[in-house]
Image (cartoon, grey):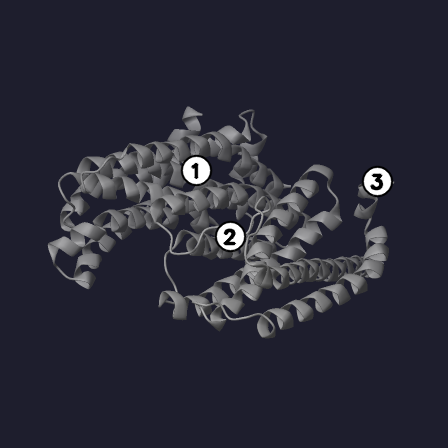
Amino acid sequence: MSIWEYANPKRFMQTSAWVLPWVAVLALACLVAGLIWGFFFTPDDFRQGSTVKIIYLHVPSAMMAINAWVMMLVTSLIWLVRRHHVSALAAKAAAPIGLTFTVIALVTGAFWGQPMWGTWWAWDPRLTSFLILTLFYLGYIALWQAVENPDTAADLTAVLCLVGSVFALLSRYAVLFWNQGLHQGASLSLDKEENVADVFWLPLLVCIAGFVLLFVALVLMRTRTEIRARRLQALLARERLA
Amino acid sequence: MGALLSRDLRLAMRAGGGFGLGLAFFLLLAVLVPLGVGPEGGTLGRIAPGILWVGALLACLLSLDRIFALDFEDGSLDLLATSPMPLEAVVAVKALAHWMVTGVPLTLVAPVLGVLLNLPVEGYGWLVLSLALGTPALSVIGAFGAALVVGVKRGGLLLSLLVLPLYVPTLIFGAEVVKRGAAGLEVAVPLLLLAGITLAAGALLPFAAAAAIRINLR
């Protein structure tokens, strides 16, 4: 029993059909619970008022926007090295989801920034690197769309993902150098006793879990769609030959 | 290698179009920006480093799709791929040729346009130096982008979308060198980082670009 068995599309379809409903229900439960808890049952911040509650959307979506790219990087590498089609299709499936999370993070950030910083947008390093991440996602998706042969597209996008990751990281530190930030530094880390006061922290954790599960559910769903589309095309091609 | 370089250079010179366009674009930008922004020397001098770098970058972008597209269409890219010369070297030579017909003229013209944009006197040396160091990176990164989209018909827009985010670090450090130089500040840090990007891109990206071409020629 090795993890590579799931690279077999049939095996993947069987397992994911079983896993998907559970993940989806859990994601829904976490999101509903976390968001209701966060929005209605936490106190207002003494300085920011109720605007602070946007963190329950902003922080998890920003985290997942980056994690989605990392996942695409890993699956692209697996595709390039081991040529498992499921892996390439999972990377393709994850890109629009990651783009959506990036946009959610940017938009919710703008909504929060308007009353707090007095501006919708600032050329702050974090904001700028997220804008650049959006461009990377757009380019990646556009390349998938533009190349007709699916294997060629998978290869090219995988190469782009690898090179893009290096440049995305480079841009992240370049913009740090270019402008001092308005955005607060990292408030969440694993090695601190208390990150944020527990009243805000616990619902936030539930929301983060909900976003992770939501991402997994969406990727599974979209990968299944891609596999079915691929099978359909194979059937059509076979029919044309017959 | 020498033969390929001289062939590419000769094609670029005699075929016209593409490469002269970049230079013309750069010139137009430097003339139009003061007309749009207004003639006050202080404002112009402050934005001149950024404008010149953005202009050089966009001018470079204009001719990128010509690096491989023409050779792909008439089949000479297949010949180059099967020739005894490694494809990585072909990419490197083609990027070099692209730099010689866009980056070098842009670098040489930039000080003249600096005058138009009222660039402070201290900035000229750093402008030329930063463009000379940074434009090779633009060409190599662009060659990688061009290699990715070589099989796509009318891939110009896609190419710009792919290459633009890759250009960000080069632009930031390049413009920063000129900005600091013009203000009389210490420039060593961005200058070294800029040189680092050029060296790393020149050393590594030809491999990625060659891989992309092999995939496209499959």
| Residues beneath discs 3 and 1 located on the same chain | no
- Write down the residue under mark 1: B140
Quarter location, residue A124: bottom left
Quadrant housing the C terminus of chain B: top right
Find the residue positioned furthest to the bottom. A40
Above or below: residue B176 compared with residue B40:
above
- Write down the residue under mark 2: A187
- Write down the residue under mark 3: A2
Residue neighbourhood size for the residue with mark 3, other residues' Cα within 10 Å, grouped as few (<14), some (14–19), many (≥20): few
Label 1 lies in what chain?
A: B
Q: Nearer the viewer, mark 2 or mark 1?
A: 2
Callout 3: helix, strand or loop? loop
Q: CA distance from mark 3 to mark 1?
A: 41 Å
x, y percent for residue B130: 28, 37
Answer yes or no: is residue B67 visible: no
- Residue name at image x 24 percent, y 47 percent: B49
x, y percent for residue A85: 74, 48
Mark 2: which amino acid?
Answer: Ser
Give A57 or B113, whichever is nearer the viewer: A57
x, y percent for residue A127: 43, 56
Answer yes or no: is residue A10 visible: yes
- Residue name at image x 44 percent, y 45 percent: A171
x, y percent for residue B47: 22, 52
Mark 1: which amino acid?
Answer: Val
Mark 3: which amino acid?
Answer: Ser
Q: Is residue B101 left or right of residue A159?
A: left
Q: CA distance from mark 2 to mark 3?
A: 38 Å
Residue neighbourhood size for the residue with mark 1, other residues' Cα within 10 Å, grouped as few (<14), some (14–19), many (≥20): many
Give A139 or B211, whichever is nearer the viewer: A139
Q: Are marks 2 and 1 in contact (CB under 8 Å)?
A: no
Above or below: residue A107 compared with residue A241:
below
Q: Is residue A164 left or right of residue A123?
A: right
